[in-house]
Image: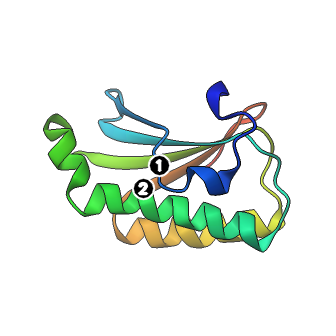
Amino acid sequence: MDEHRGTKTEDRVGMIDMIAQDTKRGEIVLRMDEPDPWDGSDERLLALQERFNTYVSFLLDGEMASEHPELAGKRARIELRCSQMPDTRALELLGMIHDQLAFQEIKLEVVVRELGVIGC
């Protein structure tokens, strides 16, 4: 989303960028926008991890079902949208997050604007 341009990841830790329903796949989609370049810093990775914690908490702690009862019980997907390919450290973190989300039956997809879907 363009309104996040220039807003640092750390400043958006408690935010969910978009909630939608993918009727073709029967899933809830929580979109996380990361428009800033990847810099490999510990601060950036910590902020990314905290953002994922916010999204997962929203899904699993009942807040999503409370705010959107029509979506309760549906499968969920977190879609990370980036302006460029994540760097090596971010990819390693995303791999670990992917594996942990799989235990909760939550999908993770990374979409790089110029490349399309690169992970699931």
Q: Quadrant of residue 44?
A: bottom right
**Amino acid at pointer 2:** Tyr
Question: Does 27 sit left or right of 53 as displayed?
Answer: left
- Image quarter where the N terminus lies is top right
* Numbered circles on residues, count: 2
Which residue carries the number 2 mark? 55
**Amino acid at pointer 1:** Ile
Residue at x 39%, y 61% (from the top left corner): 56
- Secondary element under disc 2, as helix, strand or loop, is helix
Note whether residue 25 is visible.
Answer: yes
Residue nearest the observer in this picture, 21 or 4: 4
Label of residue 78 in the image:
1
Q: Position of residue 73 (x, y in %)?
A: 17, 49
Do the residues under discs 2 and 1 have CB atoms within 8 angstroms? Answer: yes
Question: Does 11 sit left or right of 107 as displayed?
Answer: right
For residue 1, above or below residue 54: above
Q: Position of residue 108 (x, y in %)?
A: 51, 53
For residue 112, above or below residue 114: below
- Secondary element under disc 1, as helix, strand or loop, is strand
Residue nearest the observer in this picture, 31 or 24: 31
Q: Position of residue 59 (x, y in %)?
A: 30, 55
For the residue carrying disc 1, how many other residues have a C-alpha within 10 Å: few (<14), some (14-19), or many (20+)? many
Question: Does 57 sit left or right of 116 as displayed?
Answer: left
For residue 86, above or below residue 34: below
Specify which label sits upstream in the sequence, 2 or 1: 2
Marks 2 and 1, how far apart at CA? 8 Å
Q: How is the image coloured?
A: rainbow
For the residue carrying disc 2, how many other residues have a C-alpha within 10 Å: few (<14), some (14-19), or many (20+)? many
For residue 65, above or below residue 92: above
Q: Quadrant of residue 62?
A: bottom left
Q: Position of residue 5 (x, y in %)?
A: 72, 33
